[in-house]
Image (cartoon, rainbow, N blue to C red):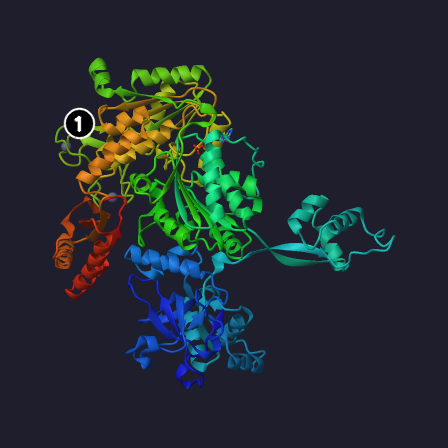
């Protein structure tokens, strides 16, 4: 870190230089600062810099450096402030990533600085902290008063011996009031100074103690005087090159640390601190891949991919491979080809639940060339992986969403597995879809991109029809294993037959029993979490709703609470209706806990685990359950969406889907597509081994086309029907979509601002090129105490849509629209 004394750039004689800084604030512009002479040569494009903004310092990103300000005519030079500090002489961001973030910010109508912040690993964007340092005068004062025991001297002494003491540390040492008073006094006297320091405590390289021999050649009898333990230590060290971690040394030599200490005293070795890598896999790696003989389908797909790799040009492929068709094997070989070509590869995977499986496999194949990036890494692990990528040590990256910004150089291949997955979408500012950025990144790098899925997003499949993507398919499972047989169970018939609202139909229960008897495994999927969807009063018909969000609370049986799954509001579950005080309240719907209870009661011997966000808050817990299921230590998994995707368990022959219907009734134009994808994915978990799989889907809407096509496992059938609906109703991919969400605790305030925005949009849409809808209450009209209004823009012309949004935002701002409560989302994935 470099500290700038007090950048009075006007006093310097050399030609002033300036830097454009992108700041992580929701303003879509960059800011110009002057560069003090001391850091002229240090600051580079991509450096993080501390700059004054308003009355606070902000960390921003240097995106351009100018010799002079010719290109910024009209800028008032005297108002240009100097950069305060620069954090990296060796920038964390590459130019490629800076430009990619620029593209993304423009495309998604968000700020460049916010996008750059999202591009860097979390934890590195740490905060600024004020620290205190002793001055020359302070040191002189200390020297002049060696024996004086005043508090002032004590504080000075503390500051001197503790580099960069924080005010907090001082308060701890000297009590709050004293610290405050004396610090003020010492500052006044000029004995100490305040420094704003970038706080990187959480992301420093990790160091550990290691031993190193000071001498390697020993005379024949030189070691005879040493004890056996000491000789053992020296033996181990002589076999190592360089340093050996103390922990390793103790393990290998089988001694305690006392002989090591003695050897140090005797001058045989020294103890040094060395940097150690925080490995997200903790060194656990599965055995290197056994080489499969490629199937015919895999062979021909790979042939196309390899010939494209050889061309070193941008090309996009949609790899549509049914579940169990061996897509992973294709990815691995494609990565290998790119590495052999001295280029790098980036693979995106959807969720944490998938990363351990994939990353272990990739680690097994590519070893330390692989870096792993996902949100449940510690910031230390993430920081280390990131630096390995930046330095070129890692040439393959596997990661979730934000890994699309990994600073790989010389990129040859991007893979987006399960490209239809909604977890590629960032649901907070800055909104972006990593799959779509991936296309642009590959294009800019002249790289190949493979989007893989068993159920491609409608937009992606459509792109193969228009020729934007090349279509590759793996229509058959490995070994020509049959797809699982799917059946729909009409729950209306079950109801009229039994007269009861059963949760598990007799047919499904029977199938569970048979599967259990055969010693095979089953998966039961429920499309939601919690015990029961909601609590309903039979007298007044009211359900219990969240006070902040106006959505029904979910009943959790284990702790007898009602919980809001949006804002986490919880109450004890009531025994009388909060609305009419009737006692006749009851629980409607069903949840994973309830199904777990029913199954345990019916089949006491079944070894069952529940997998949902409640039961698997911790990554380890989830990994553990999946591993036990994989080892056949469990017979059954009951769970939500988490168990539907990606996993490759060979002994699963039954998949039961308990409730899909609520997914169909979501107020979202993609609800049919989501349901179809979920059913196809979960059906793909069955029959992956030698045994035929069976899928039973319970529904009250057996005639719905999403269910019919899912039953027939016909993607094409579903696509045809869905695409004509999208065209008829003006939905993507036939139009570009933007949603403007206006949120505020006061409804009228939100509404008034929404009206202003709508007016601005209308004036940008005089020719009627786009359709503007709203403001209307959003599908979730109240959330976390805020009212939510939505304006939707649809346009056949994306450029026009973007211009409208930009013009609308500017115009609304001049009409005093409160832009702080306006959230613009381009290509929204969920209309919530
Ligand atoms: P997908 O991702 O398409 O659902 P996977 O890549 O998980 O499919 O492959 C399914 C299974 O087939 C895995 O167990 C994998 O190891 C195995 N497999 C893949 N390719 C081959 C092959 N050529 N020969 C034999 N087994 C294969
Ligand atoms: Zn709530
Ligand atoms: Zn009531």
Residue closest to the eye, 650 or 768: 768
Write the residue at 49% across / 57% down: 203
Above or below, 510 against 412 in this view is above
Picture coordinates of residue 473, whole percent (x, y):
40, 34
| Circle 1 Cα neighbour tier, 10 Å, few/some/many (<14 / 14–19 / ≥20) | few
Residue closest to the eye, 613 or 740: 740
Asked if disc 1 is less than 8 Å from ligand 3, the answer is yes
Can see residue 388? Answer: yes
Picture coordinates of residue 343, whole percent (x, y):
52, 51
Picture coordinates of residue 227, whole percent (x, y):
80, 49
745 left or right of 104? left
Name the quarter where the C terminus is drawn.
top left
Instruction: Say which residue label 1 marks.
Output: 584
Write the residue at 73% across / 51% down: 237
Picture coordinates of residue 290, whole percent (x, y):
57, 33
Write the residue at 42% across / 34% down: 646
């Amino acid at each position: 870190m470099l500290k700038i004394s007090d950048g009075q750039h006007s006093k310097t004689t050399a030609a002033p230089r300036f830097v454009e800084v992108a700041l992580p604030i929701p303003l879509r512009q960059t800011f110009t600062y002057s560069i003090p002479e001391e850091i002229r040569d240090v600051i580079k494009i991509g450096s993080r810099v501390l700059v004054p903004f308003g009355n606070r310092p902000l960390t921003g990103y240097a995106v351009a450096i100018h010799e002079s300000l010719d290109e910024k005519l009209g800028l008032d030079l005297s108002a240009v402030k100097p950069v305060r500090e620069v954090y990296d002489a060796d920038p964390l961001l590459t130019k490629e990533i800076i430009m990619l973030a620029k593209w993304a910010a423009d495309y998604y109508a968000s700020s460049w600085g916010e996008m750059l912040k999202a591009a860097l690993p979390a934890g590195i964007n740490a905060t600024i902290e004020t620290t205190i340092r002793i001055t020359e005068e302070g040191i002189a004062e200390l020297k002049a008063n060696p024996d004086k025991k005043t508090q002032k001297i004590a504080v000075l002494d503390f500051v001197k011996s503790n580099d960069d003491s924080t005010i907090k540390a001082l308060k701890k040492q000297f009590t709050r009031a004293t610290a405050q008073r004396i610090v003020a006094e010492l500052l006044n006297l000029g004995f100490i100074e305040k420094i704003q320091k970038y706080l990187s405590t959480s992301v420093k390289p990790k160091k550990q103690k290691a031993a190193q021999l000071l001498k390697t050649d020993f005379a024949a009898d030189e070691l005879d005087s040493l004890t056996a333990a000491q000789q053992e230590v020296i033996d181990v060290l002589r076999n190592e090159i360089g340093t050996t971690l103390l922990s390793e040394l103790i393990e290998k030599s089988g001694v305690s640390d006392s002989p090591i200490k003695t050897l140090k005293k005797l001058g045989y070795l020294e103890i040094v601190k060395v940097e150690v890598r925080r490995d997200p896999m903790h060194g656990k790696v599965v055995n290197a891949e056994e080489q499969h003989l490629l199937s015919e389908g895999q062979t021909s797909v790979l042939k196309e991919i390899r010939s494209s790799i050889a061309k070193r040009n941008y090309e996009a492929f949609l790899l549509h491979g049914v579940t169990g068709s061996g897509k992973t094997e294709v990815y691995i070989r494609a990565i290998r080809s790119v590495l052999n070509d001295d280029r790098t590869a980036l693979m995106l995977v959807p969720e944490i639940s998938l990363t351990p499986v994939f990353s272990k496999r990739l680690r097994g194949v590519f070893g330390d060339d692989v870096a792993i990036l996902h949100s449940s890494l510690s910031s230390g692990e993430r920081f280390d992986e990131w630096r390995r990528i930046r330095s070129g040590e890692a040439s393959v990256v596997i990661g979730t969403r934000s890994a699309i910004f990994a600073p790989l150089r010389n990129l040859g291949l991007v893979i987006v597995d399960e490209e239809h997955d909604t977890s590629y979408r960032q649901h907070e500012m800055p909104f972006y879809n990593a799959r779509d950025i991936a296309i642009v990144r590959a294009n800019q790098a002249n790289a190949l991109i493979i989007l893989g899925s068993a159920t491609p997003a409608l937009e992606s499949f459509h792109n193969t029809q228009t020729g934007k993507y090349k279509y590759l398919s793996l229509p058959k499972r490995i070994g020509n294993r049959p797809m699982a047989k799917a059946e729909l169970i009409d729950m209306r018939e079950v109801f009229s037959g039994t007269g009861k609202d059963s949760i598990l139909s007799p047919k499904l229960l029977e199938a569970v029993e048979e599967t259990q008897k055969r010693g095979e495994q089953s998966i039961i999927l429920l499309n939601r979490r919690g015990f029961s969807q909601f609590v309903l009063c039979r007298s007044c018909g009211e359900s219990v709703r969240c006070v902040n969000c106006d959505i029904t609370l979910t009943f959790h049986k284990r702790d007898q609470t009602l919980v809001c799954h949006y804002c986490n509001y919880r109450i004890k579950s009531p025994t009388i209706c909060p609305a009419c005080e009737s006692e006749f309240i009851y629980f409607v719907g069903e949840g994973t806990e309830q199904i777990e209870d029913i199954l345990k009661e019916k089949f006491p011997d079944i070894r069952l685990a529940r997998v949902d966000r409640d039961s698997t808050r911790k990554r380890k817990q989830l990994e553990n359950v999946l591993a036990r299921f994989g080892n056949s230590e469990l017979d059954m998994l009951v769970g939500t969406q988490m168990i539907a995707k990606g996993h490759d368990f060979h002994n699963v022959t039954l998949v039961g889907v308990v409730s899909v219907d609520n997914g169909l009734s979501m107020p979202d134009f993609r609800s049919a597509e989501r349901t179809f994808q979920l059913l196809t994915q979960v059906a793909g978990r069955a029959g992956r081994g030698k045994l035929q799989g069976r899928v039973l889907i319970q529904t009250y809407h057996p005639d719905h086309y999403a269910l019919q096509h899912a039953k027939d496992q016909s993607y094409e059938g579903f696509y045809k029907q869905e695409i004509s609906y999208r065209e008829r109703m003006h939905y993507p991919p036939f139009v570009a979509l933007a949603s403007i969400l206006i949120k505020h605790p006061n409804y009228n305030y939100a509404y008034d601002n929404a009206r202003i925005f709508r007016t601005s949009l209308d004036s940008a849409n005089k020719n009627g090129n786009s359709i503007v809808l709203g403001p209307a209450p959003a599908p979730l009209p109240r959330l976390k105490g805020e009212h939510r209004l939505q304006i939707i823009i649809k346009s056949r012309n994306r450029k026009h849509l973007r211009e409208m949004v930009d013009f609308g935002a500017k115009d609304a701002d001049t009409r005093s629209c409160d832009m702080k409560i306006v959230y613009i989302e381009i290509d929204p994935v969920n209309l919530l």
